[in-house]
Amino acid sequence: MIVSLPVVIVALVIAVALGAAIGSLLVLRRTTQVKGMAASLEEQVRERTAELSEARDRAEREARLKSGFLAAMSHEIRTPMNSIVGMADLMAETSLDAEQREYCDVIRTSTDALLGVLNDILDFSKIESQGVTLEILDFDLRLVIEDAVELLAVKAGAVGLDLAALFEAGFDGRLRGDPSRLRQVVVNLVGNAVKFTRTGSVTVRVATLAHDDASTRIRLEVVDTGIGMTPEGIARLFRPFSQAEDSTTRQYGGTGLGLTISKQIVERMGGAIGVTSEPGHGSTFWIEVPFERGAAAPQPPASGAEGRRALLVDPLDASAEALGRLLAEQGIGSTRARTGADGVEALHAQGSGYDLVFVNVDAEAIDALAGALAHERASARTAFTVIAPTGRRALAVELVPGRPAHHLTRPVRRARLVECLQAIAAEGPPAPQPDPVAPLPRSVGTASAPADTAAAAASTSADAAPAVTGRVLVADDYPANQRLVARLLERRGYTVTLVADGLAAADAALAQPFDVILMDCSMPIADGYEATARIRGLEQGRRTPIVAMTAHDSPEDRAACLDAGMDDYLVKPIQAALVLDTIARWIALGRETAAAAPTGDRS
């Protein structure tokens, strides 16, 4: 059958049109399906996003609730602990027999341990909820290490450990970073080493791994001769609430949080932390951290003893090595003797005599050396320096009758050694060397020292007396705390007025002049912030120093106190020596300001 061409064309057109229509229908159908799938997917995304948002909000609420709960618990625990610690310190200053003193020491040791646990838990919770925040500023690493080691010197000395910090020759410690967080890590590592070492030494070694004009990488090691750890124990470290062995917690105490916190801080700094150890042969904890180079440090003053020769009589290896390195930095060569008898032999072997003799009071046969120094003609030109443990400076007595001796406490700080050498070079009396028991610097105000320094503060609190006395207003709603602070201040000659709420504090401060106000922050009727604001708003002329004395301890709490108009900040449990020093400092400053003011400005 023959089909005409027009018919074919029409058929083709119809086919094409039909195909196009079918294709359009298929595309439309597919588009509809895709749109449906997209809408469904979009709905799923919205639902999932809402779920995630709700989960995030719930987590943030829980974190806030946890932080708030822990902050509240911290306040509630610290408040009665303040009375316990303070009253134990006051009781230690009274006449006690041996049994009573033992009970008192147990109370103080136990409260220190409890405060350490509380601080660890709070810090861990803060880091878990907020992360590690770093403050970047110029600092001297040597001072950070010396501060940390000095804080633990009393604790180490109490069990007879040799504690020292060793810096490589020519060490430049001017860096940029967060010195407070780094100090926290060092205190934790050294504190752990002291806790788990019964005999021997704990040594901090500091070296530079690499450096250029802009940056430097520091390696810090804490080496101890303690109990050591098994590989299985090492694997459990740096985990929350974990220690090397279960028996370790029972025997030595602690939360197991310190290393976890340290790891988070070091890693936030861009560094690494680790440990090597062997059971019965001690441990070496190390950190490696990169820092920017800090501003150029001013040249330290010359000691004036360059070129002299020194004899070190010291049985402690780490302490002797540290002192030898410090002397070498000052251009002083040294020879070491382990005992007094060895020192006598060294003096006899040295024809022209030594210019300097440094003697550790713990050296065996020290009397033999003292006798040799007293009778040797050459020794009349020899400067004699006695080194005693931190917190026991009274041991640094004059060992050679008729010959004045200079004094240092160990671990020896470079600045104090330079002062001693300058005094020797000037042939004058040695510069006074107060017992170096001071709190770690805090970022705001003058906060209380860590629990590790409680024994040190207690050991000096009996001798701490203000250079001036005056009138002090104490605002605190806890009766035991009132009695504690009143007794502490009245025994030092202060006149104390007590009030139990913020409104009464403001009324009392405006009714009569006080030299210092100690202000609790959580009180009924009106809290410490409201009371301070009221006082600042109504006082005329003279500004009364207001020192917060509170169980709240966080950067936000410190900032709130300063924003309210307070001048300083003390954290409960308070340390007696720190409270007395703070009050005396503000009274002296206030009187100096008043004396310098024109007559018409005084009130």
Image (cartoon, helix red, strand yellow):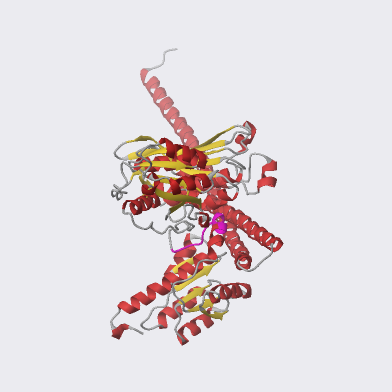
Q: Is residue 117 magenta?
A: no
Decide which of 584, 565 is in the foreground and name it.
Answer: 584
Q: Position of residue 421 (x, y in %)?
A: 36, 50
Answer left or right for 197 relative to 137: right
- Name the residue: 49% across, 64% down: 557
Q: Give the position of the N terminus as an image quadrant.
A: top left
Q: Is residue 149 visible?
A: yes
Nearest to the observer: residue 429 or residue 302: 429
Q: For residue 449: magenta?
A: yes
* Left or right position of 162 against 421: right
Image coords of residue 577 (percent x, y): 51, 65
Q: How many marks?
A: 0
Tell me the magenta residue range.
445-455
Observer-nearest residue: 451 or 303? 303
Q: Nearer the viewer, residue 398 or 352?
A: 352
| Residue 5 position within the rendered picture, expressed as x and y whole percent measured from the top left | 36, 18
As drawn, 314 above or below 473: above
- Residue drawn at x 56%, y 58% is 454
- Vertical relation: 16 (above or below) 346: above
Residue at image coords 43%, 50%: 385
Which image quarter is the C terminus in?
bottom left
